[in-house]
Protein backbone atom coordinates (compact mmCIF):
# COMPACT_ATOMS: atom_id res chain seq x y z
CA UNK A 1 0.00 0.00 0.00
CA UNK A 2 1.47 3.34 -1.03
CA UNK A 3 0.50 6.26 1.20
CA UNK A 4 0.44 9.88 0.08
CA UNK A 5 1.60 12.52 2.57
CA UNK A 6 -0.79 15.50 2.76
CA UNK A 7 -0.21 18.60 4.89
CA UNK A 8 -3.40 20.38 5.98
CA UNK A 9 -1.51 23.70 5.96
CA UNK A 10 -1.19 23.39 2.16
CA UNK A 11 -4.95 22.96 1.63
CA UNK A 12 -7.65 25.63 1.40
CA UNK A 13 -10.18 25.59 4.27
CA UNK A 14 -12.72 24.05 1.89
CA UNK A 15 -10.32 21.28 0.74
CA UNK A 16 -9.25 20.58 4.32
CA UNK A 17 -12.88 20.28 5.42
CA UNK A 18 -13.76 17.91 2.57
CA UNK A 19 -10.72 15.71 3.27
CA UNK A 20 -11.26 15.63 7.04
CA UNK A 21 -14.93 14.64 6.91
CA UNK A 22 -14.15 11.90 4.38
CA UNK A 23 -11.41 10.48 6.64
CA UNK A 24 -13.32 10.51 9.92
CA UNK A 25 -16.53 8.73 9.06
CA UNK A 26 -19.15 7.90 10.07
CA UNK A 27 -19.74 10.60 12.67
CA UNK A 28 -22.69 10.91 15.02
CA UNK A 29 -24.81 14.02 14.62
CA UNK A 30 -25.76 16.37 17.45
CA UNK A 31 -28.92 18.23 16.53
CA UNK A 32 -28.38 21.22 18.78
CA UNK A 33 -31.14 23.49 20.02
CA UNK A 34 -30.24 26.81 21.63
CA UNK A 35 -31.91 30.07 22.61
CA UNK A 36 -30.86 33.63 21.89
CA UNK A 37 -30.93 35.96 24.90
CA UNK A 38 -34.31 37.25 23.66
CA UNK A 39 -35.70 33.71 23.78
CA UNK A 40 -35.66 33.09 20.02
CA UNK A 41 -34.93 29.40 19.40
CA UNK A 42 -32.34 27.91 17.03
CA UNK A 43 -31.70 24.38 15.77
CA UNK A 44 -28.75 23.07 13.69
CA UNK A 45 -26.88 19.79 13.10
CA UNK A 46 -23.25 19.24 14.17
CA UNK A 47 -21.31 16.11 13.25
CA UNK A 48 -18.03 17.18 14.80
CA UNK A 49 -19.62 15.58 17.86
CA UNK A 50 -19.02 12.94 20.43
CA UNK A 51 -19.36 11.81 24.03
CA UNK A 52 -16.56 12.95 26.32
CA UNK A 53 -16.94 11.15 29.62
CA UNK A 54 -19.57 9.88 31.97
CA UNK A 55 -18.57 11.14 35.44
CA UNK A 56 -20.00 13.69 35.07
CA UNK A 57 -21.61 12.90 31.75
CA UNK A 58 -20.29 15.24 29.08
CA UNK A 59 -20.46 15.82 25.34
CA UNK A 60 -18.43 17.92 22.92
CA UNK A 61 -19.15 19.36 19.50
CA UNK A 62 -17.30 21.84 17.35
CA UNK A 63 -19.13 24.83 15.96
CA UNK A 64 -16.70 26.06 13.34
CA UNK A 65 -16.54 29.66 12.21
CA UNK A 66 -18.66 30.24 9.12
CA UNK A 67 -17.22 30.71 5.64
CA UNK A 68 -17.10 34.46 6.36
CA UNK A 69 -15.15 33.78 9.55
CA UNK A 70 -18.07 34.80 11.77
CA UNK A 71 -19.51 32.65 14.58
CA UNK A 72 -22.58 30.59 13.77
CA UNK A 73 -25.86 31.23 15.60
CA UNK A 74 -25.40 28.16 17.81
CA UNK A 75 -22.04 29.42 19.11
CA UNK A 76 -23.41 32.92 19.68
CA UNK A 77 -26.31 31.52 21.67
CA UNK A 78 -24.21 29.14 23.77
CA UNK A 79 -21.73 31.94 24.49
CA UNK A 80 -24.59 34.19 25.60
CA UNK A 81 -26.69 31.70 27.59
CA UNK A 82 -24.44 28.73 28.54
CA UNK A 83 -27.16 26.22 27.66
CA UNK A 84 -28.02 23.84 24.83
CA UNK A 85 -29.86 20.60 24.08
CA UNK A 86 -28.40 17.79 21.98
CA UNK A 87 -31.21 16.00 20.13
CA UNK A 88 -30.61 12.80 18.17
CA UNK A 89 -32.22 12.39 14.76
CA UNK A 90 -33.05 8.84 13.64
CA UNK A 91 -33.31 8.02 9.95
CA UNK A 92 -36.89 9.19 9.61
CA UNK A 93 -35.88 12.71 10.74
CA UNK A 94 -32.81 12.90 8.46
CA UNK A 95 -34.45 15.17 5.90
CA UNK A 96 -35.66 17.67 8.50
CA UNK A 97 -32.29 17.55 10.26
CA UNK A 98 -30.59 18.41 6.97
CA UNK A 99 -33.03 21.27 6.30
CA UNK A 100 -32.08 22.88 9.62
CA UNK A 101 -28.49 23.24 8.36
CA UNK A 102 -29.66 25.97 5.99
CA UNK A 103 -28.06 29.29 6.90
CA UNK A 104 -31.10 31.20 8.07
CA UNK A 105 -30.71 34.78 9.29
CA UNK A 106 -29.92 35.13 12.98
CA UNK A 107 -33.26 35.11 14.80
CA UNK A 108 -35.11 32.89 12.31
CA UNK A 109 -36.49 29.85 14.14
CA UNK A 110 -35.61 26.57 12.39
CA UNK A 111 -38.29 24.68 14.36
CA UNK A 112 -40.97 26.68 12.55
CA UNK A 113 -39.16 26.72 9.20
CA UNK A 114 -39.03 22.92 8.93
CA UNK A 115 -42.17 22.03 10.91
CA UNK A 116 -40.81 20.57 14.13
CA UNK A 117 -42.36 20.76 17.58
CA UNK A 118 -40.70 22.49 20.54
CA UNK A 119 -41.00 20.55 23.80
CA UNK A 120 -40.02 22.43 26.95
CA UNK A 121 -36.83 21.26 28.67
CA UNK A 122 -36.73 20.69 32.42
CA UNK A 123 -33.51 22.48 33.41
CA UNK A 124 -32.47 24.68 30.47
CA UNK A 125 -34.22 27.32 28.40
CA UNK A 126 -33.67 25.80 24.92
CA UNK A 127 -36.52 23.43 24.03
CA UNK A 128 -35.87 19.89 22.85
CA UNK A 129 -37.17 18.53 19.54
CA UNK A 130 -40.39 16.75 20.54
CA UNK A 131 -40.06 14.35 17.59
CA UNK A 132 -36.54 13.19 18.66
CA UNK A 133 -36.44 9.95 20.69
CA UNK A 134 -33.28 11.05 22.52
CA UNK A 135 -32.47 14.50 23.92
CA UNK A 136 -29.81 15.67 26.37
CA UNK A 137 -30.14 18.90 28.30
CA UNK A 138 -26.68 20.43 28.67
CA UNK A 139 -25.04 23.22 30.63
CA UNK A 140 -21.89 24.72 29.15
CA UNK A 141 -18.61 23.59 30.75
CA UNK A 142 -16.13 25.30 28.43
CA UNK A 143 -15.68 26.72 24.94
CA UNK A 144 -12.22 26.21 23.47
CA UNK A 145 -11.48 28.08 20.23
CA UNK A 146 -8.74 26.64 18.03
CA UNK A 147 -7.56 28.80 15.15
CA UNK A 148 -9.03 31.92 13.59
CA UNK A 149 -10.90 32.70 10.37
CA UNK A 150 -13.19 30.51 8.25
CA UNK A 151 -13.77 26.92 9.45
CA UNK A 152 -11.63 27.31 12.61
CA UNK A 153 -12.88 25.15 15.47
CA UNK A 154 -14.77 26.18 18.58
CA UNK A 155 -15.05 23.17 20.87
CA UNK A 156 -18.20 23.43 22.95
CA UNK A 157 -18.07 21.10 25.94
CA UNK A 158 -21.29 20.56 27.84
CA UNK A 159 -22.27 18.68 30.97
CA UNK A 160 -25.37 16.55 30.48
CA UNK A 161 -27.82 17.50 33.20
CA UNK A 162 -30.71 15.34 32.12
CA UNK A 163 -31.65 12.90 29.34
CA UNK A 164 -35.01 12.27 27.70
CA UNK A 165 -35.23 8.79 26.15
CA UNK A 166 -38.24 7.29 24.37
CA UNK A 167 -39.64 4.45 26.49
CA UNK A 168 -39.83 2.10 23.51
CA UNK A 169 -36.04 2.39 22.98
CA UNK A 170 -35.02 1.92 26.64
CA UNK A 171 -33.85 -1.61 27.48
CA UNK A 172 -34.24 -2.98 31.02
CA UNK A 173 -30.43 -2.70 31.36
CA UNK A 174 -30.80 1.10 31.18
CA UNK A 175 -29.34 1.51 27.70
CA UNK A 176 -30.81 2.50 24.34
CA UNK A 177 -31.68 -0.38 22.02
CA UNK A 178 -29.23 0.27 19.20
CA UNK A 179 -30.89 -2.33 16.97
CA UNK A 180 -34.15 -0.37 17.11
CA UNK A 181 -32.85 3.21 17.26
CA UNK A 182 -32.31 3.60 13.48
CA UNK A 183 -29.36 5.94 14.04
CA UNK A 184 -27.70 7.81 11.18
CA UNK A 185 -24.16 9.11 10.78
CA UNK A 186 -22.51 11.71 8.58
CA UNK A 187 -19.72 10.67 6.20
CA UNK A 188 -17.64 12.36 3.49
CA UNK A 189 -19.05 14.37 0.58
CA UNK A 190 -22.85 14.09 0.79
CA UNK A 191 -22.84 10.55 2.19
CA UNK A 192 -24.65 9.37 5.29
CA UNK A 193 -24.87 5.95 6.87
CA UNK A 194 -27.92 4.28 8.40
CA UNK A 195 -27.22 1.92 11.30
CA UNK A 196 -29.53 -0.92 10.25
CA UNK A 197 -29.25 -4.25 12.12
CA UNK A 198 -27.59 -5.79 9.00
CA UNK A 199 -24.86 -3.16 9.15
CA UNK A 200 -23.99 -3.90 12.80
CA UNK A 201 -21.73 -6.49 14.39
CA UNK A 202 -20.80 -7.29 17.98
CA UNK A 203 -17.41 -7.71 19.63
CA UNK A 204 -16.74 -8.34 23.30
CA UNK A 205 -13.77 -6.52 24.86
CA UNK A 206 -10.71 -8.71 25.43
CA UNK A 207 -10.31 -9.78 29.03
CA UNK A 208 -7.21 -10.71 31.06
CA UNK A 209 -6.68 -14.47 31.50
C1 LIG B 1 -25.18 16.62 8.95
C2 LIG B 1 -24.53 17.96 9.14
C3 LIG B 1 -23.49 18.07 10.03
C4 LIG B 1 -22.87 19.33 10.27
N1 LIG B 1 -21.85 19.39 11.16
C5 LIG B 1 -21.31 20.59 11.46
C6 LIG B 1 -20.28 20.67 12.45
O1 LIG B 1 -19.89 19.69 13.07
N2 LIG B 1 -19.78 21.91 12.72
C7 LIG B 1 -20.24 23.02 12.10
O2 LIG B 1 -19.77 24.12 12.43
N3 LIG B 1 -21.19 22.96 11.14
C8 LIG B 1 -21.75 21.78 10.82
N4 LIG B 1 -22.73 21.70 9.88
C9 LIG B 1 -23.21 22.93 9.25
C10 LIG B 1 -24.18 23.69 10.16
O3 LIG B 1 -25.29 22.89 10.51
C11 LIG B 1 -24.65 24.97 9.43
O4 LIG B 1 -23.55 25.83 9.27
C12 LIG B 1 -25.80 25.67 10.12
O5 LIG B 1 -26.30 26.68 9.26
C13 LIG B 1 -25.40 26.32 11.42
O6 LIG B 1 -26.56 26.87 11.96
P1 LIG B 1 -26.58 28.01 13.04
O7 LIG B 1 -25.91 29.23 12.44
O8 LIG B 1 -28.04 28.18 13.28
O9 LIG B 1 -25.85 27.51 14.26
C14 LIG B 1 -23.33 20.47 9.60
C15 LIG B 1 -24.38 20.34 8.66
C16 LIG B 1 -24.96 19.10 8.44
C17 LIG B 1 -26.09 18.96 7.45
Image (cartoon, grey):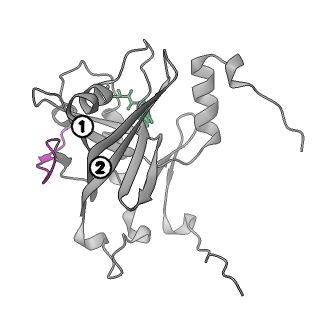
Helix, strand or loop at disc 1?
Answer: loop
- Residue 106 versus residue 84 in the image, above or below: above
Residue 125 lies in the magenta-colored region: yes
Q: Quickly name the residue at label 2.
A: 87
Q: Position of residue 82 (x, y in %)?
A: 24, 37
Q: Quadrant of residue 56?
A: bottom left
Q: Nearest the camera: 176 or 95?
A: 176
Residue 82 disc label: 1
Q: Position of residue 197 (x, y in %)?
A: 50, 69
Helix, strand or loop at disc 2?
Answer: strand
Q: Quadrant of the N terminus?
A: top right
Disc 1 from disc 2: Cα separation? 17 Å
Q: Please tell me how crowded label 1 is: few (under 14), some (14-19), or many (20+) other residues with Cα within 10 Å.
A: many
119 horizontally vs 99: left or right: left
- Residue 175 versus residue 142 in the image, above or below: below
Read off the magenta span.
115-126
Residue drawn at point x = 15 percent, y = 45 percent: 117
101 horizontally vs 198: left or right: left
Q: Please tell me how crowded label 2 is: few (under 14), some (14-19), or many (20+) other residues with Cα within 10 Å.
A: many
Residue drawn at point x = 62 percent, y = 38 percent: 22
Amino acid sequence: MQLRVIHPSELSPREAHALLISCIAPRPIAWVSTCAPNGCTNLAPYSYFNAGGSNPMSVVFSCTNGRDGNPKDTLRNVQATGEFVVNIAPYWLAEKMNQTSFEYEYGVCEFEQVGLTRAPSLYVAPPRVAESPIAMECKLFQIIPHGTGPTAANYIIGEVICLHIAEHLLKPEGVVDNLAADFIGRMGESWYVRATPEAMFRMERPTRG
